[in-house]
Image: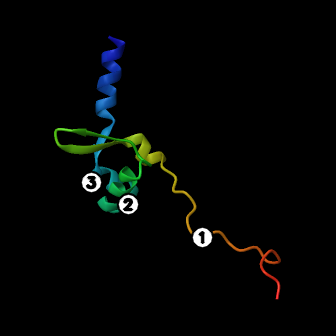
Amino acid sequence: MVKQNKAVADLLSLITLDEAAALRGVSRAAISYLVARGRIQSKEMFGRVLVYREEVLSYKPAKGGRPAIKKGKGKSK
């Protein structure tokens, strides 16, 4: 019985990419990018890609960009 309840709760926590995009305030393509990079887990059901609501809400983007060059550590002239 407990296993079945977990399975049902698991299914109820899945949302579409459009719903995920609306929750985060980003485009559907941005959510698709995260799924493709493995940063958000997804499941395919009935030919549709679904993601977990909690993962979408708790996702924290990594700091991007090139690391800063520290002064005094570069080549000297």
Residue depicted at x 34% and y 15%:
3
Could you tell me how far apart the alpha carbons at marks 1 and 2 are, in whole angstroms?
A: 26 Å
Q: Secondary structure at mark 2?
A: loop
Proximity of marks 1 and 2: CB atoms separated by less than 8 Å:
no
Q: Position of residue 15 (x, y in %)?
A: 29, 43
Q: Circle 2 sits on which residue?
A: 25
Reading the chain from its start, which is encountered first: label 1 or label 3?
A: 3
Residue depicted at x 29% and y 25%:
8
Could you tell me how far apart the alpha carbons at marks 1 and 3 are, in whole angstroms?
A: 31 Å
* For residue 12, side relative to residue 34 (left or right): left
Q: Circle 3 sits on which residue?
A: 18
Q: Position of residue 35 (x, y in %)?
A: 36, 50
Q: Position of residue 55 (x, y in %)?
A: 43, 43
Q: Position of residue 46 (x, y in %)?
A: 16, 38
Q: Circle 1 sits on which residue?
A: 66
Residue depicted at x 48% and y 46%:
58
